[in-house]
Image (tube, grey):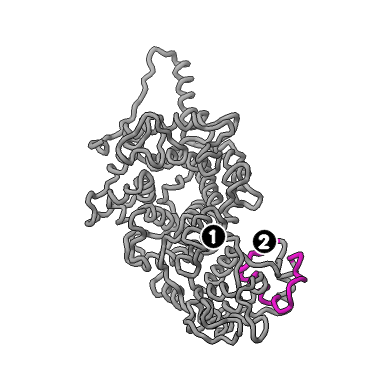
């Protein structure tokens, strides 16, 4: 491998001898037809079906991820899919993503993670797909970290795989990294990936970390697909081509009778996506006979996981529905669509629409001051723990908003490992959460006899009362341990939104038109209807449900979603 990048691929010409003119002509026509078939990968899935699935998924992602974050869910993969799909997305959506990234990079002083360097690779891909230059974000070159070979490969095979994919997405030069023990090169990353290939032809997440690869080790479709995506641009190297051919045989034999793959114990959409994207990057047709089982292609298989709303399931049985499944399936079928239409592959982004980064002044004014009418005491909260997450939200639909608020200290878990997203919220707990979300200074301005000074919630309740966010169930009582209902939450969030500078006024006609779509809108209290109409109209509450259920206790995940929506709308995130 030391001379691997000095290899020059030579074009080989076959010379036909001893054939008649007619035989030569037939052979030539056959060769020409074969060349055309190999040069134009197409999906066996009906064009209209695939295009509709892409558009429906794009619409779902766009309405679900209104404010993309720096995250593996609700972040870069959503940006990648939408940008590479060509779906009509406003420039402000991408600009909002860039501003979020810029602030994130500033808050962390350019160090996205001490050990997981895939964080850099993922953000580089998101920015490149959106048309921004990752080499100058708040003054930091995000590609520079990938110049450190040891740190990049520390986390395992994912490190070199995604470093290559990110760096090759726009042919970025690997910067010299003065802090690196070993300066990274593309040759080193390719060699590291090849070193970890398992004898069966595949790769998996852990094999090869200690330098030893046993003959009984097994590859998995996800990591094998990802490895092939990284190696796709290096097929002119004999060792890479040989490893690729061996991996393709492994994957073809692993594919099931429905055209899909088992990963982590289940037939799932994500495993299929990684293999499909790999074939697209390699220029292999979706209907290549090696990857058609019982008439089912990879694209056919992915589409079978689709839901009516444009999202995708994790498993064919319908379990594990999540934004993660939807985002990955989306960019998978986008990759297939691009291959079918003869466009650059998903990760060959030199064709990405270029965008100028918003100026620092524009970003600072939006991110640090919020709306013009914001109360002076409301402030933006910085990220204090970028890696904060909880075990029980990994596949939750609201994971992104829970983690975004938890990383800023707004939300905490029931313990270090669990958030308990479906648990109810007391009135005292809500007072604490909403005052933290707005960054309000604490006061003890409480008039409630059932809120003793010694209680943990005394200052949060006093602060929320002082700023007009909460009121009592009676003039003298707050009922701190009572469960807060959905309509009570709407009222308090609307009051918080007004402090943030939002216009929360709603007239009778707007209230009627907004709430009439819900079957049970007449059960909402008169005092809550204006706030409910505001929250639905501002996308703070989800209007996809058939009922308001105004008197039901609100869940912790709902609180996270509502506050995240409010803060985003008020330019405070």
Where's residue 139, x and y in %?
Answer: 32, 66
Residue 356 visible in image: no
Whole-number angstrom distance, CA of label 2 to CA of label 1: 21 Å
- Dot 2 lies on which element? loop
Could you tell me how many numbered marks the image carries? 2
Where's residue 442, x and y in %?
Answer: 48, 82
Tell me which corner region of the image, top left, top right, bottom left or bottom right, holds residue 545: bottom right
**Viewer-side residue, 61 vs 110:** 110
Name which residue lies at 50% across and 31% down.
254
- Figure check: 212 above or below 489: above
Tell me which corner region of the image, top left, top right, bottom left or bottom right, holds residue 502: bottom right
Asked whether 287 falls inside the magenta stretch, the response is no
* Circle 2 residues within 10 Å: few <14, some 14–19, many ≥20: few
Q: Write down the region rendered in magenta.
A: 517-545
In primary-sequence order, the first of circles 2 and 1 is: 1
Residue under numbered circle 1? 89
Name which residue lies at 37% across and 38% down.
207
* Circle 1 residues within 10 Å: few <14, some 14–19, many ≥20: few
Residue 544: mark: 2
Residue 485 visible in image: yes
In this rendering, position of residue 112 left or right of residue 397: left
Asked whether 522 falls inside the magenta stretch, the response is yes
**Quarter occupied by the N terminus:** top left
**Viewer-side residue, 330 vs 281:** 330
- Dot 1 lies on which element? loop
Name which residue lies at 55% across and 80% down.
461
């Amino acid at each position: 491998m030391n001379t691997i990048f000095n290899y020059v691929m030579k074009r080989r010409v076959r010379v036909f001898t001893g054939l008649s003119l007619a035989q030569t002509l037939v052979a030539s026509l056959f060769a020409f037809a074969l060349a055309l078939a190999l040069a134009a990968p197409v999906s066996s899935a009906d064009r209209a079906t695939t295009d509709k699935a892409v558009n429906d998924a794009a619409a779902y992602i766009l309405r679900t991820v209104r404010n993309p974050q720096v995250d593996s869910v609700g972040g870069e993969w959503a940006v990648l899919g939408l940008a590479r799909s060509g779906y009509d997305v406003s420039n402000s959506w991408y600009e909002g993503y860039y501003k979020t990234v810029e602030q994130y990079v500033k808050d962390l002083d350019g160090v996205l993670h001490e050990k997981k360097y895939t964080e850099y690779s993922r953000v580089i891909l998101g920015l490149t797909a959106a048309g921004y230059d990752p080499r100058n974000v708040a003054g930091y070159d995000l590609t520079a970290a990938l110049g450190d070979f040891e740190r990049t490969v520390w986390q395992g095979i994912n490190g070199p795989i995604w470093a290559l994919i990110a760096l090759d997405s726009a042919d970025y030069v690997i910067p010299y990294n003065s802090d690196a023990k070993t300066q990274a090169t593309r040759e080193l990353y390719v060699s590291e990936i090849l070193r970890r290939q398992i004898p069966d032809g595949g790769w998996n997440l852990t094999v090869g970390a200690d330098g030893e690869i046993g003959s009984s080790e097994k590859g998995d479709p996800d990591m094998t697909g990802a490895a092939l995506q990284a190696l796709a641009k290096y097929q002119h190297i004999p060792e890479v081509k040989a490893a690729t051919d061996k991996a393709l045989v492994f994957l073809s034999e692993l594919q099931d009778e429905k055209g899909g793959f088992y990963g982590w114990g289940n037939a799932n959409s994500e495993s299929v996506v990684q293999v499909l994207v790999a074939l697209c990057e390699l220029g292999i047709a979706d209907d290549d006979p090696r990857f058609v089982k019982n008439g089912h292609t990879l694209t056919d298989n992915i589409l079978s996981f689709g839901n009516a709303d444009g999202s995708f399931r994790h498993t064919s049985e319908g379990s594990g529905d999540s934004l993660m499944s939807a985002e990955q399936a989306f960019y998978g079928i986008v990759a297939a669509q691009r291959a079918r239409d003869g466009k650059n592959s998903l990760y060959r982004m030199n064709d990405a629409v270029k965008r100028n980064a918003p100026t620092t002044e524009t970003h600072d004014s939006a991110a640090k001051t919020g709306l013009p009418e914001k109360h002076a005491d409301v402030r933006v909260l910085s990220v204090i723990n970028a890696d904060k997450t909880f075990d029980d939200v990994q596949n939750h639909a609201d994971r992104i908003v829970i983690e975004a608020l938890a990383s800023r200290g707004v939300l905490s878990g029931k313990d270090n490992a669990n958030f308990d997203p479906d648990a109810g919220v007391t009135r005292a707990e809500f007072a604490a959460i909403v005052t933290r979300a707005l960054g309000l200074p604490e006061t003890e301005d409480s008039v409630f006899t059932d809120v003793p000074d010694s209680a943990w919630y005394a200052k949060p309740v006093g602060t929320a009362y002082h700023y007009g966010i909460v009121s009592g169930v009676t003039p003298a009582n707050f009922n701190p341990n009572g469960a807060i209902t959905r309509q009570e939450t709407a009222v308090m969030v609307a009051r918080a939104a007004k402090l943030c500078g939002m216009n929360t006024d709603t007239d009778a006609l707007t209230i009627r038109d907004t709430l009439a779509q819900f079957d049970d809108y007449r059960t909402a209290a008169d005092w809550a209807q204006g706030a409910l109409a505001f929250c639905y109209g501002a996308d703070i509450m989800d209007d996809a449900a058939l009922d308001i259920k105004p008197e039901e206790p609100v869940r912790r995940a709902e609180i996270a979603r509502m506050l995240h929506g409010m803060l985003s709308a008020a330019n405070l995130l």
